[in-house]
Image (spheres, rainbow, N blue to C red):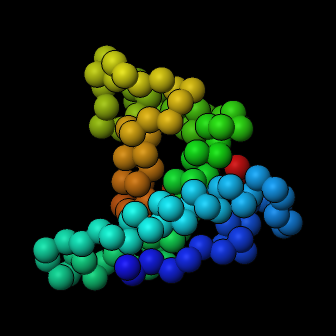
Amino acid sequence: MRGNKIFIQDWIAHHTYQKANDIDSYYLRVANQINDSLSTLWFEEPETNDLIHTDALKTLSIYLTCYLEDVIANTGIFAAFRTIHKELYNQFLPFYKDNNLTDYYPEDINSEDVAVLTWLFLVNGIHICLLILMAV
């Protein structure tokens, strides 16, 4: 496994507060589970495989866990992204027509949201995901 463990300092570094609380240990476990799963990825082309750096996987794991935190806490950060995207492009998410989102529930965790966040992270790197998720 290529992944390194995510520590509480890594998790807290992506939040606006400085001291961990009890719920952070839960989210830290989730982030590490996601990181472990992502660390098993392997691509046939060595060039593609080499692009998947351990630090990037750790950061992506934290961002996806921040999305979970946003949905559970009903913070509304990703909901705000959907609202703005709808205003600008007349659809809630990139790549997905609203009428094709038949099993999509905005108040729940959705695979389409995870796909969009992963795409934003891989294409734009840290900058776009920070704007969407950093306020959690």
Q: In the drawing, does residue 57 fall left or right of residue 130?
A: left
The N terminus lies in which quarter of the figure?
bottom left
Residue 22 located left or right of residue 50: right
User: On the picture, is 28 further left or further right than 57?
Assistant: right
Residue at the far left: name it: 44
Tell me: residue 13, above or below residue 15: below
Q: Nearer the viewer, residue 48 or 129?
A: 48
Vertical order, 117 against 38 (above or below): above
Question: What residue appears at the point 71 percent right and 71 percent down from the top-left corner?
Answer: 8
> Residue drawn at (86%, 66%), measured in percent from left and top?
19
Report which quarter residue 75 is drawn in: top right
Residue 126 appears anywhere in the view: no
Taking 39 as reference, is 25 above or below it?
A: above
The percent position of residue 57, horizontal first and vertical second, equals: 44, 70
Q: Nearer the viewer, residue 120 or 112?
A: 112
Vertical arrangement, residue 66 with respect to residue 89, above or below = below
Between 85 and 28, the residue placed more toward the observer is 28
**Residue 64 placed where, x, y %?**
52, 53
Which residue is found at the position 67% from the left and 66% from the top?
A: 11
Q: How many marks?
A: 0
**Can you tell which quarter of the image residue 6 is in?**
bottom right
**What residue is shown at x 52% (from left), y 26% (from top)?**
106
Residue 17 visible at all? yes
Q: Position of residue 92 (x, y in %)?
A: 44, 28
Q: Position of residue 52 (x, y in %)?
A: 34, 75
